[in-house]
Amino acid sequence: MKKMLSIATFFLMLLPAMALAQNPPVRSYPDLTYVNVLQAMIKLGKFKPETTEFLDAYSMVAHCDVVQGSFKDEFRWNQARDAMKKYLAVRTTKFPTRLAVRSRIMFDRYDLETKYYLFSSSTPVQKINTFTTDTRPRTEPCERPTNALLPAHFQVITNNPVTLPGLRLSEEQAKDLRQKFEQAGNANRVAYIRFNIDVTDAEYIGPSVFATQQGAGDKPWKIKATMHSIEFFSDSQYRNRFFYYVPL
């Protein structure tokens, strides 16, 4: 009997942790930008700025504000290169591979039969699996010919496309959400959605054993990824989350 009670107590202690795993605390993630994807590739070993040309291209694109004052002086620029190598040696393992895409979504009506609070037809969530970054930064005076070693932009494609007609809510939950829209004067029932994406793999960019200078050729570059989760918020600061969804 004591053994049975101890097992029951153990599972009761686990319940809060299990609930927390299903609905974890709100965290902030870096946006899915050109530079952040490029740095995720560095962490994964899919972009290696090991030669002077690739190091310069990375520095100009990702840290123009830091290096632009050094380029005119070749001696200072050589010092800047050494500093960038040291920076990458320290920071590479800390570059994030989970990145976020923020957007807005509109709700329509609650379907009493399916128990879904449906999304508006103007903001559907249907077979979503492709996210395109901004174009390669072209900040003066950091726009150099070597920058063309890097792609024009990245196309991040997840291996688990997401289709959602809406959010599955109880009638009480749906009434509560609609009431919050009304209290906020949010007649269009606009909410804020965040796609959290794990960058997992990509074709290699960088010097190879076959050539000292082998880059992207200034073309779009496909990145493999997985949709980790989708969060729904009531505020544009992405703090007040009301729904957390994990795709298969």
Image (cartoon, rainbow, N blue to C red):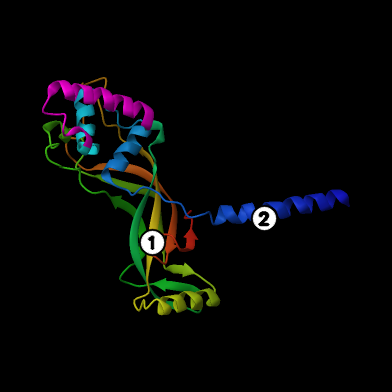
Camera-nearest residue between 66 and 169: 66
- How would you rate the neighbour count of disc 2 (Cα within 10 Å): few for under 14, some for 14-19, many for 20 or more? few
**Is residue 137 toward the left or the right of residue 174 in the image?**
left
Residue type pointed to by label 2: Leu
* Residue situated furthest right in the rendering: 1
Q: Is residue 218 magenta?
A: no
What is the span of residues highlighted in magenta in the rendered image? Answer: 66-91
**Front one among 134 and 26:** 26
Q: Is residue 127 left or right of residue 245?
A: left
Question: What amino acid is at disc 1?
Answer: Ile
Q: Position of residue 136 (x, y in %)?
A: 20, 43
Q: Which mark is residue 15?
A: 2
Residue holding disc 1: 193
* Residue at x 12% of width, y 34% of height: 144
- Which of 79 and 174 lies nearest the eye of the viewer? 79
Please identify the quarter of the rendering in which residue 51 is found.
top left
The vertical placement of 196 against 192, above or below, is above
**Residue 18 in sight:** yes
In the rendered image, residue 77 lying in the magenta stretch gets the answer: yes
In front of the other: 153 or 83 = 83
